[in-house]
Image (cartoon, rainbow, N blue to C red):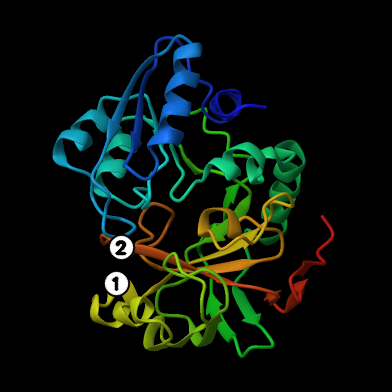
Amino acid sequence: MDKIKKAQMSMINCLAPKRSDRVLILCDKNTLELAQAFFEAAEGLNVETILVELPVGSHHGDEPPTLVADAMIHSDVIIAPTTFSITYTNATRAALARGARVATMPGLTMDMLIKGGLLADYVKIARNIRKFGKKFQRAKEVQVKTSLGTDITFSIQGRRWILDDNGLCHKRGFITNLPAGKVFIAPQEKSANGRIVIDGAFMDRSEENVEITVKDGLATEIKGNADAESLMDRGKCARTICEFGIGMNPMSKVIGNILEDQKALGTVHFGFGDNSTFGGEVKCDIHVDGMVLDPDVFIDGKEIIKKGKLILKL
């Protein structure tokens, strides 16, 4: 299946564009080929489409230019295969408030478009994720441990799991991150205590492990590469654990790309920074994720993942 057909299938399944929709495709110089595939796919669906090439941002959560932000609030569908994520930006929040349907794809590659997690059986994934939601929507506490030294506990009481069940984004004001297939939640901001050893991708790098000491929801020490350690200089927001997620997509593989990796079945990831779009209290211009591989995960004392294998019966 060629890239245009794959892009068109993804658009139809995820966003269900109508002929009356105004479609905005955002990219940068690193992702122009991907954006052109989506542009041609949209043209084949006979919808009004504009492609805008942005400057490459400096980090996830970097705001797009004002002219682009204005275009976003006047769009019905926004597709964003960009180098850095625009998910946690004021521009995206404003577009969602006006009813836009948004699909962000930071770091998407052509291989991922053609043969990655986008090829999964999303009907089955949706069924499993919804069963997970029914079991744990009222859960209170999560613990994550690994053989490398991760041992962290945090409260999720009063917070709701976000069920990224199949990437369907058909309703006004909905947003998804493709490829889809994870569950995630905003922990109570001051509740996390312990240690995290990131042994997968973190801040778009995966060369070495990053060790993070956490007290009362804040990273108090970060050891690893220079980019990771620089979070300590970005202020309180950048050091706040804002997200915990579990991969539920059996077709996604750990390839060193956070977009694909965090959907891989049995992996978990922690986010630092903004969580205001999914039930948290932290609002700022940064959000970065780090992967933890082969974890043991306990929810209210019940083990659901053992050494990276989902053992929960759904």
Q: Residues within 10 Å of mark 2 (few under 14, many from 20)?
A: many
Image coords of residue 42 (percent x, y): 46, 19
| Point 38% across, 84% down: residue | 219
**Residue holding disc 2:** 286
**Disc 1 residue type (three-letter):** Cys
**Residue holding disc 1:** 237
Image coords of residue 99 (percent x, y): 36, 29
Q: Residues within 10 Å of mark 1 (few under 14, many from 20)?
A: many
User: Does residue 53 lie above or below 106 as drawn?
Assistant: above
User: Does residue 131 lie above or below 170 as drawn?
Assistant: below
Residue 173 in view of the camera? no
Question: In the drawing, does residue 124 fall left or right of residue 141?
Answer: right
| Point 41% across, 80% down: residue | 217
**Disc 2 residue type (three-letter):** Ile
Of residue 275 and residue 203, the one placed in the foreground of this image is 203
Circle 1 — which element? helix
Of residue 260 and residue 241, the one placed in the foreground of this image is 260
| Point 56% across, 84% down: residue | 152
| Point 49% across, 42% down: residue | 176
Circle 2 — which element? loop
Q: For residue 27, what is the image quadrant?
A: top left
Disc 2 to disc 1: CB gap under 8 Å: yes
Residue 309 in view of the camera? yes
Tell me how far mark 2 sits from mark 1, CA to CA: 8 Å
Question: In the drawing, does residue 62 fall left or right of residue 183?
Answer: left
